[in-house]
């Protein structure tokens, strides 16, 4: 029988466990630590991640990215960091030729990632940023589920469900409710859809005897899925898409909002750009 180098070394260490090389090998073989994440600083000493937000924060889509970045900072300490780049929306800086190179769609959030190769990757659209960052910078899956997890598919589904359902409804509901001249038919239609999408989240949180978070076993685990929807659901009531008093119609959503908003890292994300 022919053994590979790793197999031969394993058998040798079983026979002679006190050899110095065997101690190191055994630690390596049984280690449960992560394989690490990409460098957060370039060889030139510049932070590899540059996150673009509006001055003052203020955007639910911007809040998604800011909350995730603050959560990762808290979870990984010095292993994760980023540089915040703020742009002035009132001066229409997001329509500048310079910012168009960061995001051709001229919106925030936007992200530049200087790779170890020296190439700069640009990532835009909030859900793309959330997916990219958790894939690359959450090796221990503290805020996400691995691709081998049975929960990964649902995590991905909520990341796509938000932009396809919650975001357009939020924008329309706020728009029609703020119009000086009301359009009753449009307001009624959008109001019903807004109630429906909030009901979808409430129904999920109502399952299995009541859940704390959207994805995961039992009560669920706080993850990027929750981060992706929280700012928009919060904004739906804060900006008048649905009356604030109506929140009591969806008690599980109300508790979920309060639970997430109480996290110090979420508060930090909501005020990113204001500091």
Image: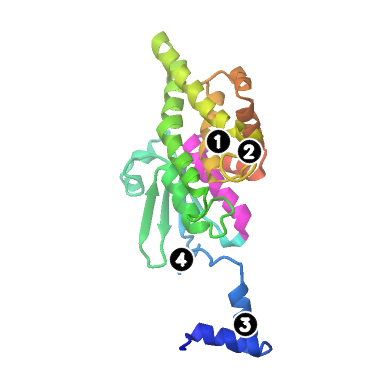
Disc 2 to disc 4: CB gap under 8 Å = no
Residue at image point 56% right, 25% down: 238
Q: Residue 230 carries which label?
A: 1
Disc 3 to disc 1: CB gap under 8 Å = no
- Among the two numbered marks 4 and 3 on one chain, the one whose residue lies closer to the N terminus: 3
Q: Mark 4 points at which residue?
A: 42
Given this view, does label 2 or label 4 mark the residue nearer the observer?
A: 2
- Among the two numbered marks 3 and 1 on one chain, the one whose residue lies closer to the N terminus: 3
- Magenta region's main secondary structure? helix
208 with respect to 63 (left or right): right
Given this view, does label 4 or label 3 mark the residue nearer the observer?
A: 3
Given this view, does label 3 or label 2 mark the residue nearer the observer?
A: 3
Disc 1 to disc 2: CB gap under 8 Å = yes
Secondary structure beneath dot 2 equals helix
Range covered by the magenta-colored residues: 56-77
Q: Name the residue under label 3.
A: 24
- Among the two numbered marks 1 and 2 on one chain, the one whose residue lies closer to the N terminus: 1
- Among the two numbered marks 3 and 2 on one chain, the one whose residue lies closer to the N terminus: 3
Q: Which of 261 and 5 is in front in this view?
A: 5
Q: Image height check: is 8 above or below 177? A: below
Q: Which mark is residue 260?
A: 2
Residue 59 in magenta stretch: yes
Secondary structure beneath dot 3 equals helix
- Among the two numbered marks 2 and 4 on one chain, the one whose residue lies closer to the N terminus: 4
Q: Distance between the residues labelled 2 and 4?
A: 33 Å
Secondary structure beneath dot 1 equals helix
């Amino acid at each position: 029988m022919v053994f590979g180098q790793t197999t031969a070394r394993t058998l040798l260490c079983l026979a002679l466990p006190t050899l110095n090389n065997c101690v190191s090998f055994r630690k390596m073989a049984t280690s449960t630590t992560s394989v690490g994440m990409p460098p957060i600083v370039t060889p030139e000493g510049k932070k590899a991640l540059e996150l673009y937000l509006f001055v003052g924060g203020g955007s639910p889509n911007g809040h998604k990215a800011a909350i995730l970045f603050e959560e990762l900072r808290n979870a990984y300490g010095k292993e994760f960091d980023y540089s915040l780049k703020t742009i002035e929306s009132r001066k229409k800086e997001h329509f500048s030729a310079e910012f168009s190179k960061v995001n051709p769609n001229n919106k925030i959030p936007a992200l530049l990632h200087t790779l170890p190769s020296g190439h700069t990757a640009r990532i835009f659209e909030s859900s793309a940023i959330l997916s990219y960052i958790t894939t690359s910078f959450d090796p221990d899956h503290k805020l996400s589920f691995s691709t081998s997890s049975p929960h990964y598919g649902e995590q991905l589904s909520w990341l796509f469900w938000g932009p396809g359902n919650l975001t357009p409804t939020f924008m329309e509901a706020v728009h029609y409710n703020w119009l000086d001249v009301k359009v009753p038919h449009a307001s009624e239609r959008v109001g019903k859809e807004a109630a429906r999408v909030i009901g979808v989240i409430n129904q999920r949180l109502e399952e299995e005897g009541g859940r704390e978070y959207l994805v995961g076993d039992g009560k669920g685990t706080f993850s990027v899925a929750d981060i992706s929807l929280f700012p928009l659901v919060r904004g739906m009531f804060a900006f008048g898409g649905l009356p604030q008093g109506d929140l009591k119609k969806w008690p599980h959503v109300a508790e979920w909002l309060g639970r997430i908003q109480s996290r110090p890292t979420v508060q930090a994300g909501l005020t990113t750009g204001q500091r």
